[in-house]
Amino acid sequence: MSIASILQEIFGYASFRGPQQDIISHVVAGGDALVLMPTGGGKSLCYQIPAIARKEAGLGITVVVSPLIALMHDQVAALHEAGVSAAFLNSTLSSDEAYATEQRLLRGEITLLYAAPERVTTPRFLAQLDALFERGQLALFAIDEAHCVSQWGHDFRPEYRALTVLHERYAGVPRMALTATADALTRADIVERLQLEAAAQFVSSFDRPNIRYTIVEKKDASTQLLRFIEREHPGEAGVVYCQSRKRVEEIATMLAQTGIQALPYHAGLDFKVRQANQNQFLRSEGVVMVATIAFGMGIDKPDVRFVAHLDMPKNIEGYYQETGRAGRDGMAADAWMCYGLQDVVNQRRMIDESPAAEDFKQVMRGKLDALLGLAEATDCRRVRLLRYFGEESHDCHNCDNCLQPPEVWDATDAARKLLSTVYRLQQSSGVSFGAGHTMDIVRGKRTEKVVQRGHETVSTFGLGADYSESQLRAVMRQLIAVGALQVFTSEGFSTLHLTEASRAVLRGDVPVQLRESTHQRPEKRSRSRTAPAPVAANLGQDAMVRFINLKSWRSEVAKAHNLPAYVIFHDATLAAIAERAPRSLADLQNISGLGTRKLEAYGEAVLAVITGASEALAVAQAA
């Protein structure tokens, strides 16, 4: 079967997207590959189709290395629905279940086997691979989430380093490394660590044009988040990321109290609670998951309409991957973040206090500075985001800065007054102080602390009285970002210190241009909580009735199979069926997402739903 036939008959798609065909052809022919493709770009097909093609050619089994249990379960379930023999080996299996899977593996009954890197490199698993290799039955190694191999990546996992054994032990078996996020430094590290110097590199566009990027200044984060969800995404699925477990539970409780279906997820929860919450998020509509970054990797839910960050991530790679979980179905979605000075201070402190080597800390500071630059930007956010990954673009007209160009002001004078105050405090008292106290002096506020320490006599006292606190906080963020100020923490207290880079700003050689306080986007007209999914928004009245009935039928099938509904059919497939109003199995041919196996399994049931919807509609119209 050709790769085009596999795409059509098994997965139900008429054509490849982007570089998929070139990647798949290269790997089917036995080539190694490094694949960078954004979330939602069809990365999984790049190893699933070669696995099927090489299995049919008698070349054996594909091993997919993944750290993500959720991804293993979802993809194996989806492959089973498509008629492909797939399995996983992970900690959710009993010893008997794992043994049975291993026996199927050795008998050559599996096309794709998913396993975590820790398992792949165990003597037991390697012995099983040895047996397959000796029989010529190892077709391909697909190393997913390959950025985990790099210390420069946002999710470094040391166990990935041991995967070099695959190249050393099984020469001639093609390998492909895949990731959705890697800057130039991380890509180079992946190539070196996995010994992929001779591999072809396929780098897709990182652009996700359906995602709208919005970044606002943090004022009252909880209220800002609630307003955002209620105005723009009522009743829709989303993910809210918080930095701490405590914050996760506070926000989840707050949202639930306002009537939003919100659930917490973090590593401190009991495993059964985490699993139940994740399952509800995947299998129900309109659930908002409030989580630490422990949640999300490997989640294929296509209809996540927004991802919100209540705290600033560590770097652009993490931000990009997390926001990329929105809008996997290609429909409009939002990436919304609020951030403030304390976020910058916290992230700097974590870097500075880490036990890592100084060269590593310097790279991490640079990555944080790039993210802060994105947050403070007054130009197109998408242009900046893509440029970080080495991709040039043009204004997107779908980010907050493009839709509402911000006012800009010259903050050089304010920056010099803040730096001068830090200097004079150090000179006069021999100790350093924090951001709040420094700003109080510049603004001329006679607080108890200012008066007790006699700091109203500092020469810069009150010189910045015309500046608001939010303006000075923005200046402070910028100074920390460019390295003109450093934050040190001792015994729980953060203090500001000048650096070598402070001199140029104090002399006025380096201008400081800042955006005015972030404006809120105009309120959208809210859809009702019973509004149709965006993918079906353009359906006519009759087709909408069919779509709603199809969704109800799909829900029952998913429950019976104990699967998320999107594993049965995506909304886009149901919408296409509803629009076509098929009367026969032939009418269902060539609908995207409806392959041969699913047509055989569900075709008659789908026609029955369509017929029933039509009859009900006719009765209603006659009445």
Image: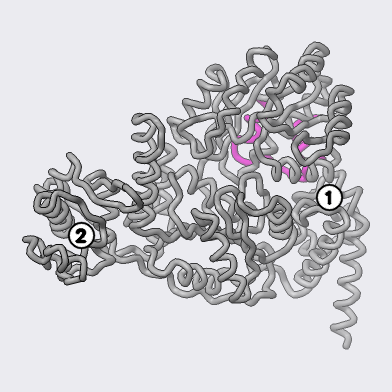
Q: Which mark is residue 10?
A: none
- Left or right: where does residue 346 sit relative to residue 106? left
Q: Residue at x 44, y 59 (%)?
A: 399
Q: Which quadrant does the C terminus fall into?
A: bottom right
Residue 503 image offset from top left, x and y in percent: 13, 44
The answer to whether 342 is drawn above or below residue 7 in the figure is below
Q: Which residues are magenta?
A: 1-26
User: Of residues 334 and 19, which is closer to you in this image?
Assistant: 334
Element type at mark 2:
helix
Residue 584 image offset from top left, x and y in percent: 91, 57
Q: Which mark is residue 438?
A: 2
Of mark 1 and mark 2, the one earlier in the sequence is 2
Element type at mark 1:
loop
Residue 145 falls in which quadrant of the image?
top right
Q: Which mark is residue 589?
A: 1
Tell me whether circle 1 and circle 2 mark residues in contact (CB < 8 Å). Answer: no
The answer to whether 111 is drawn above or below residue 601 in the figure is above
Magenta-drawn stretch contains 439: no
